[in-house]
Amino acid sequence: MSLAASQLVLARGGRDVLSDLTLDITPGTVTALLGANGAGKSTLLGALAGELAPRAGRLSLDGVDLQDLGVRRLARLRAVLPQKPGLGFDLPVAEVVAMGAYPFPELTPAEVDGLVAQALALAGMTEHATRRYLALSGGEQQRVQFARVLAQCRAGRQAGQARYLLLDEPISNLDPRHQGELLQVATRLAHEEGVGVLVILHDVNLAARWCDRLVMLAQGRLLAAGPPAEVLTSALLREVYEVDADVIDHPILPGRRLVLMR
Amino acid sequence: MSARGTGAPAPDPAPRGRGPAILAALAVLTLIAALLAAANGAVDIPLGQLARLLATPAADLADPADRLARNVFIDIRLPRVLFALLAGAGLALCGAAMQALFRNPLAEPGLVGVSAGGALGAVAAIVLGAGGFMLTAVAAFAGSLAATAAAYALGRRVPGVAGLLLAGIAINAVAGSFIGLLTFNANDMQLRSLTFWSMGSLAGAQWDMLALLAPWTLLWGGWMLTQWRVMNALLLGEREALHLGFALAAVRRRLIVATALVVGPLVAATGGIGFIGLVVPHLVRMTLGANHRWLLPASVLAGALALVLADWLARVLVVPAELPIGLLTSLVGGPFFLWLLATGRGRA
């Protein structure tokens, strides 16, 4: 079982944005997707979300082609948090989170309420449940949207069914404390509930701290993939970001790496 | 989320409690307004006698005044009031749907060409054809559907909802120029008819027309009420709605088709009644919030209420003559629209 791209080629505006890319998102693991601006991270996430059709190669969820699944089935199996979610008209926070249950019309109102409450608690937004979305700060709005995809990801799940969560820069507006908390929740979701998580991040150290696997992307190609301890090297960081950095053993967390930018 | 059962850990008192209460209040108000409007007019029908008048067959009423009152109520007022309820409800519901589809509080059914197309059809029937209520109505309906179809077909070439918006604006402009051309060529009689058509009236309301329009409007309107989830999801954005499992192209097409099918016949039968589809959903949103689960049914009731009141005023303000109802709705709606723009509440 996995959410997989194999030999994926994807063009946008006549240009190949992703070429010959093979990647597996497996249940129970958190994969960080890293790369410079324009490397194709969001495009890859969009492709795995089933939004963008590949020019060549295959996209599949648990062995079934994404295009054969249809948007409705897909919404029951994976949740997506895009980079800049907005809200056209104002709604109460709990109502926004409850939208995560829309793909599951079979849920009873009480089940939806429970789901929303849990998702709000996981996102640390319980106190804000009755506030208006547009009155919140940017970071708080981002956490509400995170709660919404958490609800979608956990709704109506049957035993043994794989679920996937795709997060595009979910911590870009968050303060350091909430950055760590959000990634911790994602990690717990993967390790305790068996969700397959893909998260686009820019902070290499947060990725190395919280994620099981790093995938490094440059110019639409996959440069490296594997556990942070194996993948992170000065040479790779130079190739991906064009920066000079030292990679050392983490002084406090055994088995983890620490990246120091020069 | 709202109106869910008890035992919810997340408190959500405002929308949960207020939605059903406001719906109930609106329903009661609408009923009262409809009764008063049906009783009041050039011929006054005492409300206290209504039950007696209705229970007695016309032939058994000895007093000619009673007979007149009964006939006026059953044959003229009742169909007219019911028609006002239906038209107001349909226009406001479709307005709310278009505002959701375009993610813009200043959207209204006319945006996709349904009103301008209807007007062009009606004006063409009056100037080029023989006129008359039936021909004008059929031509107006055909014009509504054709204009909406053209806007949709052109708009879908551009991704997202922007293409539809631009195509709608262009179709409105083209229809407007043809209306101008036809008006320029019209004789005095035709000018008078098309001017009155464009100002709107519910005077054409009759039982046989209602028998046709009511089930039709209720069918499509009822379907639209079930679409509150996707309208909420669209508030997040088109991508997000897709991620939540709504096939956007299909959703857009269905909402536009339903709007054309509801508003087209209403425009055909009433002429130009502006601003109900714009102002009513907006007012409801300001009071009740943007959750379409409540916004849609509340718009139905508030639209029905607004048009019944407007038609009542149109009938009684200048007795024995009658003001065109479109004039009244625009008179109130126009300044309100300007106020929305001026105060920046249009984006609320």
Image (cartoon, grey):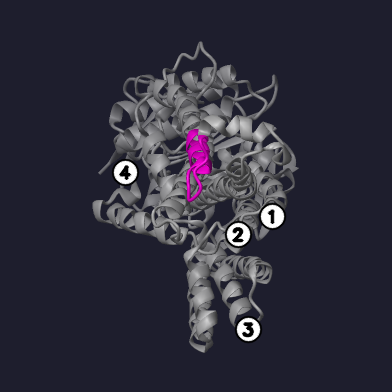
Going by the numbered disc 2, the residue's amino acid type is: Gly
Mark 3, residue position: B128
Mark 1, residue position: B209
- Which residue is at 43% across, 47% downward? B280
- Which residue is at 41% across, 30% downward? A93
How many angstroms separate mark 1 from mark 2 (CA)? 9 Å
Going by the numbered disc 4, the residue's amino acid type is: Ala
Going by the numbered disc 3, the residue's amino acid type is: Leu
Residue B32 within the segment the image draws in magenta: yes
What is the quadrant of the C terminus of chain A in the image?
top left
Percent coordinates x, y for residue B128 in the rendering: 63, 84
Q: First in sequence: mark 2 or mark 3?
A: 3
Do marks 4 and 2 share a chain? no
**What is the tally of numbered marks visible in this picture?**
4
What label does residue B204 carry, if any?
2
Closer to viewer: mark 3 or mark 4: 3
Mark 4, residue position: A245
